[in-house]
Image: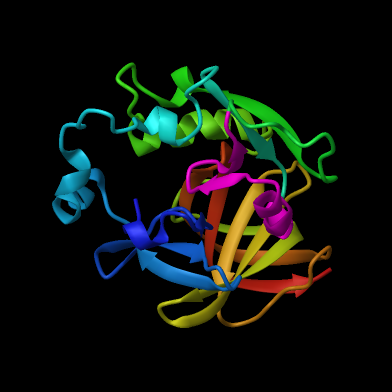
Amino acid sequence: MVAKSYQNLEVLTEPYIVKNRKYVKVRTAAGTEKQVRWYEDYEYKKLYPEDFKAPKENVKTQKEVLGFDQDGFITIFKGDTYPLKDWFKEHGARYTKFWGWSFGSFAAMPSELPEGVTPLQLQWDAVGNEDGSLKVDSQVQAAVEELLCDDSVSTFIGNIGDKVEIELFIKKVIPLDGYYGVSMMHIMEDENENVFIWTTTARTLNVNTWYKVKGSIKDHRIYNHVKQTILTRCKAEEI
């Protein structure tokens, strides 16, 4: 997890390694991206030992603080909620790194919701323990992704180290402000909807365009339940 000062910010990426340390990208209050340290549970415990002390009397549990206290669930939202952050703030929603914006079980839901988001109930049993504490980060993340992420037909292509030549459609390009400057993460699909990722500082491909891509398979990863084939050292020619 990230340091306390960043825990109310939206986490944009999976943890990645720079010089043997883990980092993630977060979106600041100003809307920009920032690289911050990602700590494993044992590292975080050393930084904030007070968070692991036994709870005192009359101190709320995480279950209560996060809004699960009345009916054992909260309402979270599927869809792109970032452009709607002002609406959520105005209507009293709260934000956490785990599931984004939510309304507690005790809160009155607005009668009308913005277009593009779908309310879903997240049950405490899926993310919490009987003593009112959250499960470990990986279990919480898995439960939330199971609820929010669509099933994907994408599968891994080839083996790590293989060279490939394949026609890919550019679905999205995301700028990342990293350790070596700004790079562009290309999210691509083949004709069978298998997902490929290529991140480079060398060029930016055109969205909604087909390319013939030559490169090497660097890794296979799963993000939001989607299997992704990670490419490197690519050359791309528009078709």
Quadrant including the C terminus = bottom right
Q: Position of residue 130 (x, y in %)?
A: 33, 16
In front: 13, or 43? Answer: 43
In front: 23, or 67? Answer: 67
As drawn, 83 above or below 178: above
Query: What range is drawn magenta here?
Result: 81-104
As drawn, 28 above or below 82: below
In front: 177, or 76? Answer: 76
From the viewer's perspective, is 115 left or right of 110? right
Q: Position of residue 115 (x, y in %)?
A: 85, 45
As drawn, 130 above or below 118: above
Q: Residue at x 61, y 70 (%)?
A: 31
- Outermost residue toward the front in this view: 58
In front: 237, or 1? Answer: 1
Looking at the image, how many numbered discs can be counted on the residues? 0
Q: Residue at x 78, y 72 (%)?
A: 206
Q: Position of residue 21 (x, y in %)?
A: 26, 63
From the viewer's perspective, is 186 left or right of 180? right
Q: Is residue 45 visible?
A: yes
Q: Residue at x 55, y 23 (%)?
A: 73
144 inside magenta stretch: no
Q: Position of residue 121 (x, y in %)?
A: 63, 25
89 inside magenta stretch: yes
